[in-house]
Image (tube, grey):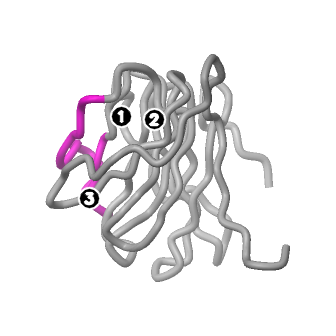
Amino acid sequence: KSFKHHQDYISAFAYNEPEKCVVVASADGSLSVISMKDRDLLYQTDNCQDEVLSCCVVKNGKYICAGTQEGSVNILKWNEEVDIADRITGHPESIDGMLKIDEDTICTGSEDGILRVVQIIPNRFLGVIGMHDDFPVERMEVREKGE
């Protein structure tokens, strides 16, 4: 199947295991959700007026976190993505990478080269776990011991 719903590049993917769907983030400022069952578009959010560069699914599939060019984490409730449910501000630059640590915690990678740990609902910065001087953090992954 061809997928032509976004007007700009696809910046990130996240899988929602309970819903069997893929969340697609785009620099056009929207998120889309694709069913893995029939590979059809279930819905696409309105443009949030900012590039969406990263995403992850938390709270056992009930929320989507989306990192933006302006440095905020937009939080959207699953099946209520028309409106942003909450927003975490405080990143001084774009959030280029995002990694779910557990159902309540994400790690954000920013243009400023800093890796931050952020708690989701209730929202708060938990700390800095790494820095890359003069280089942005664009991607993160968890590797199993021995890989």
Q: Quadrant of the C terminus?
A: bottom right
Residue under the image location 18 percent in, 45 percent down: 86
Which residue was labeled with disc 1?
Answer: 46
- Between 58 and 19, the residue placed more toward the observer is 58
Checking the image for residue 38, the label placed there is: none
Q: Residues within 10 Å of mark 3 (few under 14, many from 20)?
A: many
Q: CA distance from mark 2 to mark 3?
A: 21 Å
For label 2, the SS is loop
For label 1, the SS is loop
Which residue was labeled with disc 2?
Answer: 30
Whether pointer 2 and pointer 1 mark residues with C-beta atoms closer than 8 Å, the reply is yes
In the rendering, at what x and y percent does residue 40 appear?
62, 61
Left or right, 109 with reference to 128: right
Which residue was labeled with disc 3?
Answer: 120
The residue stretch that appears in magenta: 74-90
Residue under the image location 42 percent in, 30 percent down: 68
